[in-house]
Image (cartoon, helix red, strand yellow):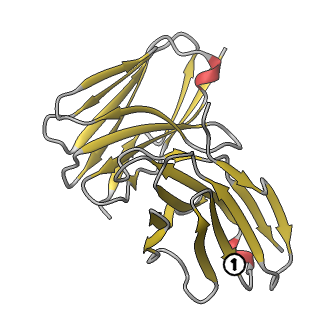
Amino acid sequence: GQQLNQSPQSMFIQEGEDVSMNCTSSSIFNTWLWYKQDPGEGPVLLIALYKAGELTSNGRLTAQFGITRKDSFLNISASIPSDVGIYFCAGHLSGYALNFGKGTSLLVTP
Amino acid sequence: DARVTQTPRHKVTEMGQEVTMRCQPILGHNTVFWYRQTMMQGLELLAYFRNRAPLDDSGMPKDRFSAEMPDATLATLKIQPSEPRDSAVYFCASGPDRGQTQYFGPGTRLLVL
């Protein structure tokens, strides 16, 4: 599958700060998905994006589908301790399989 | 609140033993996926089904892994014989459409000694 590059690999921030992470690909996708994985649990779908340029929010989370269709961004505003976890991006072009990034590990200190 | 369920949540076994992991997809979802997650490789797709038919299992070691869907409410992943390198977290996911959205179960944490 296509290689997805997520950055940063890890983030260590203070509660209340805003967070930005992104995902880039060498190929285009038709759908971008963002997941969060808590320790000891499975990834949970946060936001799904279906159209280039689309900007979608879910509470304090906002994600955008890049115009080039080769990237996506996730922002978290006013972070809180429960935002701790690993955030994965995933891209879908056709068929049934998703291509996952390696994840961004987020640590939030009170 | 519909969720994917997986059993067992944890499994410790000895090398050479058979391991069977089970998954109940969300009711009404017709695509089911098996993934393996390790620190080194991240999330790897092992196999997936649509309407219970296997579509792709190219990610699975064929000699020891097998995946089946005996019915619409049960998917199984078997490893026989298990090896220490199989130690990982195995996730099942299901989706209502062509894989655009997938919902993950809590995983089975497998340790092969």
Question: In the drawing, does residue A107 fall left or right of residue A103?
Answer: right
Which residue extends farthest left?
A: A68
Can you name the residue that lies furthest to the bottom here? B63
Work out whether residue B112 can be spotted: yes
Task: State the residue at coordinates (41%, 50%).
Answer: A101
Residue B42 in view, yes or no? no
Tag 1: residue type? Answer: Ile
**What chain does badge 1 belong to?**
B
Q: What secondary structure is found at the residue carrying circle 1?
A: strand
Image side of residue B85 versus residue A73, left or right: right
Q: Quick check: A12 above or below B66?
A: above
Count of labels shown? 1
Residue that label 1 marks: B79
Nearer to us in this view, A22 or B14: B14
Q: Above or below — where is B13 with respect to A54?
A: below
The image position of residue A100, as x and y in percent, is 41, 52
- Residue A78 % position (x, y): 49, 10
Residue B15's place in the image compared with A56, above or below, is below
Which quarter of the rendering shows the C terminus of chain B?
bottom right
Side (left or right) of A18 relative to A25: right
Which percent across, then down, holds residue B62? 55, 86
